Image (cartoon, rainbow, N blue to C red):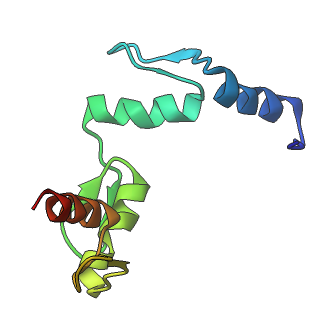
Amino acid sequence: DKAFSCYTKHIRHQRTHTGEKIYQCNQCDDTFSQNRHLIKHQLTHTGEKPYQCDQCDKAYSWNTNNIRHQPTHTGEKPYQCNQCDKAFSQNSVLIKHQRTQTQS
């Protein structure tokens, strides 16, 4: 059982189990269980990209995408294919690579 410091956090957590989505986007049919998820989603409609890479001209709507982008500058490739010797800077690219490996 999980403990919460305040009642509102408990209610917000309960929505993850019930699937209740009380926050609706006013520009499309998408709904969300938390207001912060709606706010992030609305950036897709405005085109706003407040998270700028400090090493190139790329900008992102979500900071997680900016963070995921950073290894392309460092050369770090932490995602290793378990079927060959290739490594990738992003997990999504590894997954795409692995799909091509299983299809051949």
Name the side, left or right, on which 74 lies relative to 100: right
- Look at the picture and state if 60 lies above or below 20: below
Determine the image quadrant of residue 7: top right
Name the side, left or right, on which 99 lies relative to 65: left
Name, please, the residue furthest toward the left: 104
Residue at image location 33% in from the left, 47% down from the top: 61
Residue at image location 57% in from the left, 18% down from the top: 21
Front residue of 104/89: it is 104
Residue 68 locus on image (x, y percent):
36, 65
Determine the image quadrant of residue 20: top right
Determine the image quadrant of residue 26: top left
Residue at image location 42% in from the left, 57% down from the top: 64
Residue 12 locus on image (x, y percent):
72, 29
Residue at image location 14% in from the left, 56% down from the top: 103
- Look at the picture and state if 86 lies above or below 30: below
Name the side, left or right, on which 25 lies relative to 13: left
Name the side, left or right, on which 17 lies relative to 96: right
Quadrant location of the N terminus in the rendered image: top right
- Look at the picture and state if 76 lies above or below 15: below
Residue 102 locus on image (x, y percent):
19, 60
- Look at the picture and state if 58 lies above or below 42: below
Quadrant location of the C terminus in the rendered image: bottom left
Residue 54 locus on image (x, y percent):
31, 73
Q: How many marks?
A: 0
